[in-house]
Image (cartoon, rainbow, N blue to C red):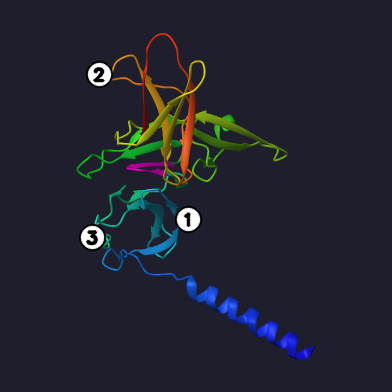
Amino acid sequence: MKVSFLKNLLSALGTLTSLGYAQTLQASWDYSYDETEAGKQIAFITPMNAGSDGSVAFVVTRGDGGGGNLQNQVFWLRAKEDGNSPDTPLWTSGWQATSGFTDIVAVRRNHLVYYTGRELRSVTLQEDGTANAPVTVKVFNGAEEGGNPVVLTLEQARSPGFVFTVATQEDKRGFTLSAFRFTPAPAVISAVPTYTTISSGNSLSISFRSSLGVNYQLQSSTTLTAENWQPVSVPITGTGGLVTLVQNVGEPMLFFRVIAL
């Protein structure tokens, strides 16, 4: 019995060892920033928020090490097209005096959403890779819209199209959750291969291969030349597999497209 048990134990250890060797972690790219010349010290860095395009965004807070005023800067980084380490970030906010807590809300493809103080801001990349100036999407007012400081979650909640804020009551005995529908920046229209089938009646099935974490939206238009396609439903998050959308069609005649947000 002891010999049999020992053989089974060695067999199990051998299996675990082989599984361990099958899993590897390899360095991909890095980026370094040094505050020595500026005479500043890094105080802390907020948790990173990664996008489905491989980019990562986070907020760095620095000070003089003597208890003076702190400054924040948003860093948005992504590897080069060839996979090598970036020379410069995709975008930075520049060092700004802290007027309120700053954090990343969401990172999408070519799209960054963050908040500072009570302002929700959005930054988008152009086709040439340069960043547009930040746009203030909303200024939260009152304790009913997020308390003080504002507490926002979006990416962590995995709920496409919504921004959530949490406000605690002044007596600390409860809280209020507020949901705001978030309209993303205009998406760069990309070719999303689709497969369409028409079932019984007026039901149209549209299937496409999705990427994990990427948000997609079905849109419709009465003409192929329309500038303003209308969303058919709220965005959905890709699973990495085949996604099927079922849409009732009828009058008037409509064209459909799937875009990646």
Whether residue 149 is visible here, answered yes or no, is: no
Compare marks 2 and 3 and give the one earlier in the sequence.
Answer: 3
Tag 3 residue: 87
**Secondary structure of the residue carrying numbered label 3:** loop
**Secondary structure of the residue carrying numbered label 1:** loop
> Where are the magenta residues, as a range?
107-115
Measure how far apart labels 2 and 3 are at the Cα level: 40 Å
Tag 2 residue: 225
Q: Amino acid at mark 2?
A: Thr
Q: Amino acid at mark 1?
A: Pro
- Percent across and percent down for residue 213 are 45, 45
* Other residues around mark 3 within 10 Å, as few (<14) / some (14–19) / many (≥20): few
Quarter of the image for residue 135 reads top left
- Percent across and percent down for residue 211 are 41, 45
Compare marks 1 and 2 and give the one earlier in the sequence.
Answer: 1
Give the left or right position of residue 37, taking residue 168 as reference: left
Q: Are marks 1 and 2 in contact (CB under 8 Å)?
A: no
Q: Is 13 part of what is drawn in magenta?
A: no
Q: Amino acid at mark 3?
A: Asp
Query: What residue appears at the point 51 percent right and 29 percent down from the top-left corner?
Result: 180
84 and 131: which is toward the camera: 84
Pick the quarter of the image with the N terminus.
bottom right
Measure how far apart labels 1 and 2 are at the Cα level: 43 Å
Q: Are marks 2 and 3 in contact (CB under 8 Å)?
A: no
Whether residue 239 is visible here, answered yes or no, is: yes
- Percent across and percent down for residue 246 are 50, 26
Tag 1 residue: 47
192 and 31: which is toward the camera: 192
Query: What residue appears at the point 44 percent right and 34 percent down from the top-left corner?
Result: 207
